[in-house]
Image: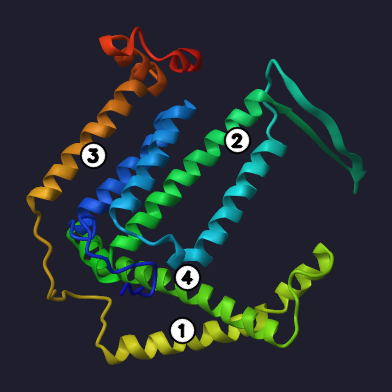
Amino acid sequence: MSSRSFFLYISKDSFMHKLNPLTKLALVLVISLVPYLIEDLLGRLVVVLLGIFLLGVSKVQIGVMKKFLVGLVLMLNTIFLGFLLFSHIEGSIILVDTTVIDTVFLLWPLEWAIFITENTIIHSIKIYLRVLAMSILTIFFFTTTKDRDIIYSLRLLKIPYAIIFVLVVTLRSMSMFVDDFFTIRDANICKGVDFNRGNPISRIKKYLSLINPLVMFLIKRIEEMTFAATSKGYIIKGQRSYYWTYPFKKADYFILVLVVTFFGIFFFGFLFDITVTQILLMVSERVSWLNGGIPWLKKLS
């Protein structure tokens, strides 16, 4: 039966769970850089599909992270709408061109015009795919890596223990904060509070009413974690010993070679301004059984 740690770790017997924490960290960091090197939609979609593949290999059940995914979807949709409504990118096809706000407030002119073209939509989708890829890779790392493994992997990089301790406490606090929020919200629902009823202003007021109990829970959590750290003998300064070791295995070296190769291909395309679509088109045109290439790739290039 799967279990979850203070953050997102889900215990599974998978190939990815057995990898060295540093290997998984390198995998996530390197692949997360790829969307910044490429501009075409297909390339960023490839990174998203790669992240989904890694989650599938890890045997992670998405239902376990239901609450976390709801917040992720809301964040992604907000980012997409933000870039869609506030970006001004010229294009050949103008879909929306209207002025929403054109007034003066305290002697300061306020103007907001919605200007949407086909390039605005493409740009918003690119940003959406970039953030989605990084989010999926982050989920992959934290669902396959224990809190303890994160500490040890960062220590192998010679990062000061004080920084690692603060980072791990922050990650654990985030998880507990989310759990406390849903606990308080559910308690209010049991008392008859309906967070889905009323206009947007009244809904915001209902959620703002949760701040006071959340702050009280936060103070209590800080006190509990302070007592726990003190009783277990945690020290920020000085040297400490470690019980667990993480040797590199053949699988780790194999994955690292794949990661370097994957990054090298995209970095080559970045240096010579070659998109993933163009690379796939060149490969398809050189394979005889594809009969001259893939038509839809030619349209995208």
User: Badge 4 is on which residue?
Assistant: 174
Q: Which residue is mark 2?
A: 124
In this view, the residue in front, 167 or 12, is: 12
SS of the residue at dot 3? helix
Along the line of sight, which residue is nearer the eye, 103 or 2? 2
Residue at image point 28% right, 76% down: 236
Residue 56 in the image, given as x and y percentages of width and height:
33, 52
Q: Amino acid at mark 3?
A: Val
Crowd around label 4: few <14 · some 14–19 · many ≥20 (10 Å): some
Q: CA distance from mark 3 to mark 2?
A: 28 Å
Which residue does the numbered mark 3 point to in the structure image?
259
SS at mark 4?
Answer: helix
Quadrant hosting residue 259: top left
- CA distance for labels 4 and 3: 30 Å
Going from N to C along the chain, the mark reached first, 3 or 2, is 2
Q: CA distance from mark 1 to mark 3?
A: 39 Å
